[in-house]
């Protein structure tokens, strides 16, 4: 069913998932329904030669632990694969990413990859890359473009599913508490794929339960500082009415915990907290009883990206969508898993 590349990706994902010790059935590791027929004008120019492959990568920023782990994974994997990586950090600004992509086009790199800070506004620059004959790989966050031939593949997580997992945890955790259950949400960066999709997945689950109500929702831009600011505002307005916090990443949950503790509330006890990412610090917080649940989002796909670059350079077809399977962890499973966390 899968071509050679697809099989290679499955093997690599089995390896990556084994690293996170998430027991998952192998057949669900990759969802690649459509195999992209790469534009021959792009691939014929990409036959492997002696010089190192040059990859231009524009990173979102350094806003979170997830992001820093992702950057390290990409840099390490490029070194190991002998790929010449031109890396730039956009400090969470789309204009800087567009500037970086244009500079990679001007430098005639072999492949461009980027993790788009927000979903929209990429059509023109991607068209410029296509016209220059440079293939583009999207990582982590998706783009909203009319013409999907503007990129080769998207390697990353299913954020809607992550939101659903968070919603299911909340429903289960609060099943014996009399309603209405009042939930606060701290969203990720405005118009970013993970913020839009996690909210959508979470609401999809919550709306079917008349006992649950989202009473506050604001963006904390995926940073600890802004997470704290938002939670401070929520607590001023709603005080002890808030029973549950859904934070779109661990970092914002940590900021929110500080805000709770400053007014004498016990995070994880007075307010149930669920976050996304699942870094080591989140596992420690679960062991300390300050965080109740983290939904895993895996940043360690550097090797997968390098493999995609290599396959592309060899003129092979690549699945249009590559999804890394991820788990959910609670206080009950934190002790068993913490030793396996890689970041
Ligand atoms: O959850 C957050 C980061 O795009 C999935 O970005 C990523 C998100 C991640 O800043 O911590």
Image (spheres, helix red, strand yellow):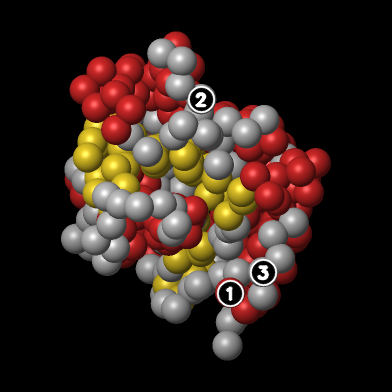
Nearer the observer, disc 1 or disc 2?
A: 2
Task: For marks 1 and 3, give the CA distance.
Answer: 7 Å
Q: Mark 3 points at which residue?
A: 24
Q: Can residue 235 be seen in this view?
A: yes
Q: How many marks?
A: 3
Residue at 19% x, 60% y is 146
In this rendering, the answer to whether 36 lies above or below 106 is below
Check disc 2 and report the residue beneath it.
Answer: 266
Q: Position of residue 64 (x, y in %)?
A: 50, 28
Q: Mark 1 points at which residue?
A: 28
Residue placed at 78% from the left, 49% from the top? 336
Quadrant where the C terminus sits is: top right
Instruction: Give the vertical position of 302 relative to 269 (above or below).
Output: below
Q: Is residue 84 above or below residue 154?
A: above
User: Are discs 3 and 2 less than 8 Å apart at CB?
Assistant: no
Residue 77 at x, y = what percent?
69, 42
Q: Which of marks 1 and 2 is nearer the N terminus?
A: 1
Vertical relation: 118 (above or below) 10: above
Q: Circle 1 sits in a helix, a strand or a loop, which is it?
A: helix
- Report the quarter where the N terminus lies: bottom right
Point 33% across, 28% down: residue: 240
Q: Can residue 70 be seen in this view?
A: no
Q: Which of 48 and 88 is in front in this view?
A: 88
């Amino acid at each position: 069913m899968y071509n050679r590349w697809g099989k290679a990706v499955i093997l690599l994902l089995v390896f990556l998932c084994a690293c996170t010790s998430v027991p998952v059935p192998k057949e669900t590791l990759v969802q690649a329904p459509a195999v992209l027929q790469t534009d021959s004008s792009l691939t014929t120019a990409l036959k492997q030669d002696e010089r190192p492959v040059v990859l231009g990568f524009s990173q979102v920023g350094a806003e979170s632990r997830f992001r820093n782990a992702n950057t390290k994974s990409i840099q390490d994997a490029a070194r190991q694969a002998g790929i010449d990586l031109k890396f730039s950090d956009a400090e969470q600004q789309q204009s800087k990413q567009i500037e970086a992509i244009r500079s990679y086009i001007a430098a005639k790199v072999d492949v461009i990859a980027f993790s788009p800070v927000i979903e929209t506004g990429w059509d023109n620059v991607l068209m410029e890359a296509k016209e220059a004959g440079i293939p583009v790989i999207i990582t982590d966050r998706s783009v909203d473009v009319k013409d999907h031939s503007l990129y080769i593949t998207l390697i990353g997580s299913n954020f809607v599913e992550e939101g659903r997992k968070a919603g299911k945890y909340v429903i289960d955790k609060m099943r014996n508490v009399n309603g209405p259950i009042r939930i606060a949400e701290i969203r990720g960066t405005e118009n970013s794929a993970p913020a839009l999709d996690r909210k959508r997945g979470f609401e999809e689950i919550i709306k079917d339960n008349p006992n649950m109500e989202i009473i506050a929702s604001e963006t904390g831009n995926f940073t600890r500082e802004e997470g704290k600011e938002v939670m401070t505002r929520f607590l001023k307005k709603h005080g002890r009415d808030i029973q549950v916090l859904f934070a779109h990443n661990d970092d914002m949950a940590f900021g929110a915990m500080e805000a709770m503790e400053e007014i004498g509330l016990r995070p994880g006890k007075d307010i149930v907290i669920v976050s996304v990412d699942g870094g080591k610090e989140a596992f420690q917080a679960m062991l300390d009883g300050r965080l109740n649940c983290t939904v895993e989002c895996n940043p360690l796909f550097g090797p997968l990206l390098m493999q995609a670059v290599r396959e592309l350079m060899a003129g092979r077809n690549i699945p249009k969508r590559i999804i890394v399977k991820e788990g959910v962890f609670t206080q009950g499973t934190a002790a068993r898993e913490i030793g396996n966390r890689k970041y």
